[in-house]
Amino acid sequence: MSGRTDDASVCWLGTLNKVRKIATALLDQQLWCWGQDIRRADGNALLAYGFTKHQPPEGKHGSTAYEWRSSGRSRVILWGFGFFYGDGDRGGLFLQRYKFAPKQTAAVDFSLPIWKSEQIPELTHPCDMEAWDRVFNLLTQGLAWIGDYEQWIISEYGLDYRQRCTDAWKKKKRIPAHEMAAKWHELVEYLLSQPKSN
């Protein structure tokens, strides 16, 4: 590795480490809330948003996948174990639950169902400046998408609905429902404000 690559890795890892605690907690809570959205008494909110449900094959145990595609090239996949965001030729990004360590893949249009994280094709940690730049672009787009989804939930079903979701969570420390969308957008703003090398 060149010194330039090492500098980029150190810089990006330092930036991730500064947000890792809040981002890990926020992703964990968000995945809980998506589970609540699926079980919503008046109908599955993910399906209402435009997601498609992909269950594991019969006889296989694992997580159901929910897939959303934009009118452009973006793709979002949700599982109980994590979040995938892909964007056409730029590849994809996976965030595993309980960890905020983005992994990249060149594969975006892989087939579903996938019901275990190890089935996602070709996941690797970024290892050079170009890969880090690509991962951070995908990361900021993916986190902004989550924030936008949370804004949609509030506008569609009301803050009381999302508050009931977070109140039902047994974890003692949680982000207030009215702050979730803003927290995602604050993370994006912070990441975008960071220098790309030391």
Image (cartoon, rainbow, N blue to C red):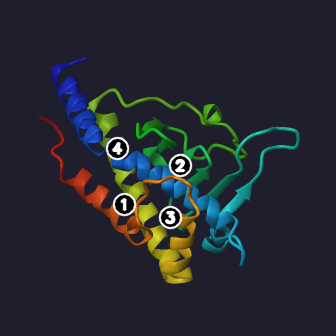
The residue identified by callout 4 is 21
User: Are circles 1 and 2 on residues that touch, CB within 8 Å?
Assistant: no
Q: Nearer the viewer, mark 3 or mark 1?
A: 1
Q: Which mark is residue 184?
A: 1
Instruction: Point out residue 146 in the picture as x, y percentages from the top left corner.
Output: 45, 61
Label 2 to label 3, Cα distance in Å? 19 Å
Label 3 to label 1, Cα distance in Å? 22 Å
The residue identified by callout 2 is 83
Callout 2: helix, strand or loop? strand
Callout 1: helix, strand or loop? helix
User: Are circles 3 and 4 on residues that touch, CB within 8 Å?
Assistant: no
Within 10 angstroms of label 2, few (less than 14), some, or many (20 or more) residues?
Answer: many
Residue drawn where x is 82% and y is 38% of the image: 60
Give the amino acid at mark 2: Phe
Q: Answer with the quarter of the image where residue 51 lies.
A: bottom right
Residue drawn where x is 33% and y is 45% of the image: 136
Give the amino acid at mark 3: Gly
Q: Nearer the viewer, mark 2 or mark 3?
A: 2
- For marks 3 and 4 on the same chain, the one whose residue lies earlier in the sequence: 4
Give the amino acid at mark 1: Trp
Residue drawn where x is 63% and y is 43% of the image: 110
Instruction: Point out residue 76 in the picture as x, y percentages from the top left corner.
Output: 55, 55
Q: Nearer the viewer, mark 1 or mark 4?
A: 4
Q: Nearer the viewer, mark 4 or mark 2?
A: 4
Give the amino acid at mark 4: Lys
- For marks 3 and 1 on the same chain, the one whose residue lies earlier in the sequence: 3
